[in-house]
Image: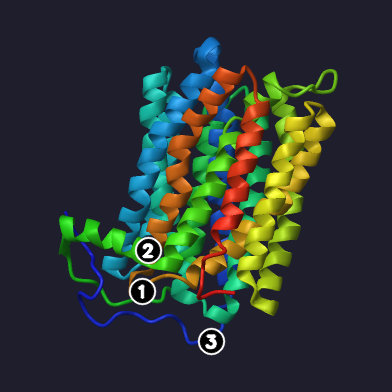
Amino acid sequence: MALSSPGTGTAPAASPPPDAKPARGLLPLLLLGNTAMYALYIGVAGVLLALQVEEIDPAHKVANFGLIAGVSAIFATVFNPVAGALSDRTGRRNPWILGAGLLAVPAMLLLGLADTILLITIAWCLGQAVMNTYQAAITSVVPDRVPVAARGRASAAVGLGLPFGSTVGALLGAAFSDHYRTGYLLFGAIVAVSAVLFTTCTAERRMPARAPLPVRAQLAAFTDALREHDFRWAFIGRALLVLGYFSVSAYQLYVLQDHTRLPQGMEPERAVAVMMPLTSVAMVVSTVLGGWLSDRYDRRKLLVGASALLSALGLLIPALSAGWTAMLAFAVVNGLGFGCYMAVDTALVTMVLPRAEDAARDMGVLNIANAGPQIVAPFIASLIVSVSGGYTALFVVAAVLSVAGALAVKPIRSVR
């Protein structure tokens, strides 16, 4: 296989002029596309997949779920930057968004038909490959088509996809908890429809196609981005925060089953459907406010660090109390912190990309900081839970990782 390389092909595409405006309708469509993506991630991995694993082997659900999540995250880590590089080479984003979006349907069909841990692992690996191809392409739309002055608003539109998608995913996941095969197909259909709408309704800013480069040289080019001081620290900060976040969120259903004292008669699936809208409202508020403040005052680092610290505070709440009220407080505080972080950090990252012509590839490299920790998180979480005999220590470790993520943005020089 031959991929793209910096400095090859025709003249590189530049970012939009600073005084340009995003195309009409682009930001709502980015919101729709990201909402559909996160609905699948949360509804499938956070609810349906956990229930499917528990149904097959209840006694070993934590270890089995950790294995599936970790192995499938390897596919996410690989496919995200590779798909980004391929879309750079073709100079196109829409075909990759459309193709991957449509493939989400058969991928979810296979997952619903799986009836062993091995088959679930294989099917979810394919699902991760498809969804990360979709994610790599749609993430690159922001540096491609949005001027720097509007990056905060665009990043807020992207960031709002997480709370909106989380709410949709949790509610649909709970609604189809007894019919997970139908639920899987519904999530795949949502992604497919959003991909069709996005590619039909947005005029693509076509870039010059890139000349191919041997695989070895392209792999070396991936590491070039991490040699850039600011990009490297942005990568480290994102990786630490995501590691802490997914160490807990991946096991949310099991936390509610085995750690939290739920009100009489409340099922864990219903508790997820109650918590997620609270988190989503908090994320919406902090995402919009964070995106606006980052554009208004041009203080990305301060907001990223403060929101990571707020997320750490939220993680400590259920470590101190296993009550249902504590989990509701956790849902709100963690939502405020994580929502602001993802909105502002995304804007910050687009400003420290090494080269505009390699935007998708470098965003794909950065997305390793999203997917890579998911490989480690399930194993770390299952080990902590097994050794400590519960989830309290897991919340503490996740909070420490969030604090480290806040400190990692301090060395960044080119962004305030």
Which one is closest to the eye, mark 3 or mark 2? 2
Q: CA distance from mark 3 to mark 2?
A: 23 Å
Q: Which quadrant holds residue 291?
A: bottom right
Q: Secondary structure at mark 3?
A: loop
Name the amino acid type tagged 2. Answer: Asp
Query: Does the rendering let one see residue 104?
Result: yes
Query: Residue shown at 54%/21% (left/top)?
Result: 62
Which one is closest to the eye, mark 3 or mark 1? 1
Q: CA distance from mark 1 to mark 2?
A: 8 Å
Is mark 1 in CB contact (under 8 Å) with mark 2? yes
The numbered mark at residue 355 is 1
**x and y percent of residue 4 in the render?**
23, 65
Q: Is residue 264 above or below residue 335?
A: above
Q: Secondary structure at mark 1?
A: loop
Q: Which quadrant holds residue 296?
A: bottom right
Image check: 124 left or right of 382?
left
Residue nearest the viewer, comparing 81 with 244: 244
Looking at the image, which residue sits at the far left? 214
Looking at the image, which residue sits at the far bottom? 19
Name the amino acid type tagged 3. Answer: Ala
Which residue lies under the disc numbered 2? 362
For mark 2, does the 10 Å Cα neighbourhood hold few (<14), some (14 to 19), or many (20 or more) residues? many
Q: Which quadrant holds residue 215?
A: bottom left
Query: Residue shown at 47%/54% (left/top)?
Result: 236
**x and y percent of residue 346 in the render?**
55, 63
- Disc with the residue nearer the chain's start (3 vs 2): 3
The numbered mark at residue 117 is none
Q: Secondary structure at mark 2?
A: helix
Which residue lies under the disc numbered 3? 20
Query: Residue shown at 63%/65% (left/top)?
Result: 156
